[in-house]
Image (tube, coloured by chain):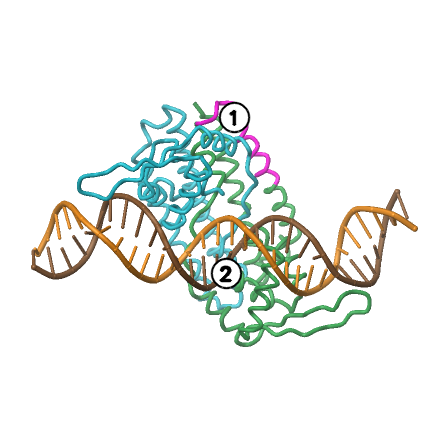
Chain colours: A green, B cyan, C orange, D brown
Amino acid sequence: MVLARLILGLLCLSPMTGYELKKHFDSSINHFWNADKAQIYRTLAQLVDQGYATVRTVPQSNYPDRQEHHITEAGREVLNQWLSSGAARSPERDPFMGQVFFAAELERDGIEQLLIERRQATQYVLDDYLSQREGIDMRAAADRRSFLMAATLDHAIRQQAAELEWLDAVLEHLP
Amino acid sequence: MVLARLILGLLCLSPMTGYELKKHFDSSINHFWNADKAQIYRTLAQLVDQGYATVRTVPQSNYPDRQEHHITEAGREVLNQWLSSGAARSPERDPFMGQVFFAAELERDGIEQLLIERRQATQYVLDDYLSQREGIDMRAAADRRSFLMAATLDHAIRQQAAELEWLDAVLEHLP
DNA sequence: CACAGTTAGTTGATTTTGCACCCACCTGCG
DNA sequence: CGCAGGTGGGTGCAAAATCAACTAACTGTG
């Protein structure tokens, strides 16, 4: 359901193939959502037979035909509905916190290793987000659309930074 | 899979019925995981026939029999394995960030409303976490187990606090 | 030339999750 | 007395998500 709305959002920016959608999920959108190829194509098909999108097959000379998906008026409507519906909070879910919660089963070294590994992974993700942000900073803030898109990345950056601080605090005070 | 491990973790603390597990997911564990009743009972059955847990039916005078689930040695092993395996990062997923990302489809008022609503919800969740923490603070930090459990709650608190700051920043600078 | 990688899309099977029910019996409140 | 709410356990079904293949042709590199 959320996926369907996100795809509509992307189609709203510009018509796209499933392949291109997948690339967005892997890059511009990866800091707040991800999706499997198969899931994307199936949702796309579903959107079409709900009348929220239409397909136009665009032949190409050297590559496979593009199945360009366009959002319809009905699609725009449900997207707007979703945006103004204040959707319910999705429950927090973090397997790593589960590991920490029960980490006392390990010896001290094991716990430290768990935290340090996570620290590295988090730092890596943060660096990725930071380098993504470099590509937009200046000219964003200008129009509202770019501002909001950049803002979601900032959110991800803040979250990762907060996690790093937390990891350091835990490592420091671990009895 | 994660759910199965979390249940093993809880059973490791003390033998429990599915009903009691559900209560933990709704209270002590709710800041990093949640689970449906049905899912818990099914996973429990699965753990039993994998040999990671055993059931002991404890009759009660006035209430239904308790199906007390005990973790086995094999169960302890897979739990420890999971804890020291540094499980892959679960992808970030936040429908609300999706709404923000595409919020430019709304008018300014709609966007502000979206953010303000979220602000309230987040404040509410944060307050809940803060009051949960009051019940543990002092005597935690003592042993490692309590420290780590409290730490996961602190993590959730930091995340919510960071989100509040972010929301305020976005509201302030929204063009 | 061989091989890895990219573009584009599809299928089948399985797992995970969520929702809505259902049972039985108990306690406490008005 | 009736009825809400707690204790304890469960089923059936449908979505959502993941995993793993498979098709088919092109492009660039060593």
Q: Chain of mark 1?
A: A
Residue A28 higher or lower than A99, as above or below: below
**B55 or A41: nearer the viewer:** B55
Where residue A23 sits: x, y (%)? 66, 57
Q: Amino acid at mark 2?
A: Val
| Above or below B130: residue A54 | below
**Which dot marks residue A2?**
2
- In the rendered structure, which segment of residues is drawn in magenta? A105-124
**A88 to the left or right of A9:** left
Residue visible at 45% across and 26% down in the picture = A173
Quadrant of the image containing the C terminus of chain A: top left
Whole-number angstrom distance, CA of label 2 to CA of label 1: 38 Å
User: Overall secondary structure of the magenta stretch?
Assistant: helix
SS for dot 2: helix
Q: Which residue is the site of mark 1?
A: A110
Percent position of residue B25, x then y: 36, 43
At which x and y percent is residue A139? 64, 57
Q: Residue at x 60, y 67 (%)?
A: A11
**What chain does badge 2 belong to?**
A
